[in-house]
Amino acid sequence: MSSFKEYISGYANGLKSLLIGMRTSMKVFCQKKVTEQYPENRHTTLHIPERHRAMLVMLHDENGNNRCIACGLCQMACPNGTIHIVSEMRETEDGKKKKVLVKYEYNLGSCMFCELCVNACPHDAIRFSNDFENAVFQKEKLLLTLNK
């Protein structure tokens, strides 16, 4: 008798689950369809949130200089080695040695957009833009040099 009750209980739970799923499906089926005209109207109708992380960019001032001091904190904070910094020591006019950024390489193809590099940067030299159209046919084009 106990197994019959379990059978009926299992059958009722299965039927209840099926009806809940069908109710959800019918609700979505009856909603008005919205078609986004992409890429023709992407600049007028497509809304990209301000906090969207799409590509790392290096900020420059009006003279074209970047704020990066080549400290390497962003490179150390990156969990999968997306950032590679090449720097060298140069002597300034007053005789002091200073670390100077030579090359800032960023591999967009292996970036997981975690923003740990941006949070680690003490001079706000890098940030994420929300330019999301980054599709390419060759993987080599995803290796970017940001300090140009």
Image: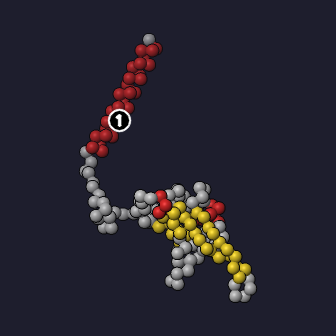
Amino acid under label 1? Ile
Which is more toward the observer, 65 or 142? 142
Residue name at image x 70 percent, y 88 percent: 93
Q: Estimate the x, y position of residue 70 in percent, counting from the top left.
A: 64, 72
Residue 32 vertical placement versus 130 (above, below): above
Residue name at image x 31 percent, y 38 percent: 23
Residue at far top of view: 1
- Asked where in the image residue 75 lies, by quadrant, the reply is bottom right
Residue name at image x 27 percent, y 55 percent: 35
Which color scheme did the rendering employ for the protein? secondary structure
Element assignment for label 1: helix
Count all numbered tags in the image, as a single digit.
1
Answer yes or no: is residue 51 visible: no
- Asked where in the image residue 116 lies, by quadrant, the reply is bottom right
Q: Is residue 81 left or right of residue 25?
A: right
Which is more toward the observer, 27 or 135? 135
Q: Name the residue beneath numbered marker 1.
A: 20
Answer yes or no: is residue 1 visible: yes
Q: Estimate the x, y position of residue 95 in percent, counting from the top left.
A: 74, 85
Q: Quadrant of the N terminus?
A: top left
* Residues packed near mark 1 inside 10 Å, few (<14), some (14 to 19) or many (20 plus): few
Residue at far right of view: 95
Residue name at image x 58 percent, y 69 percent: 104
Residue 12 vertical placement versus 54 (above, below): above
Which is more toward the observer, 3 or 93? 93
Q: Is residue 72 left or right of residue 65?
A: right
Q: Estimate the x, y position of residue 107 in percent, counting from the top left.
A: 53, 61
Residue 99 vertical placement versus 18 (above, below): below
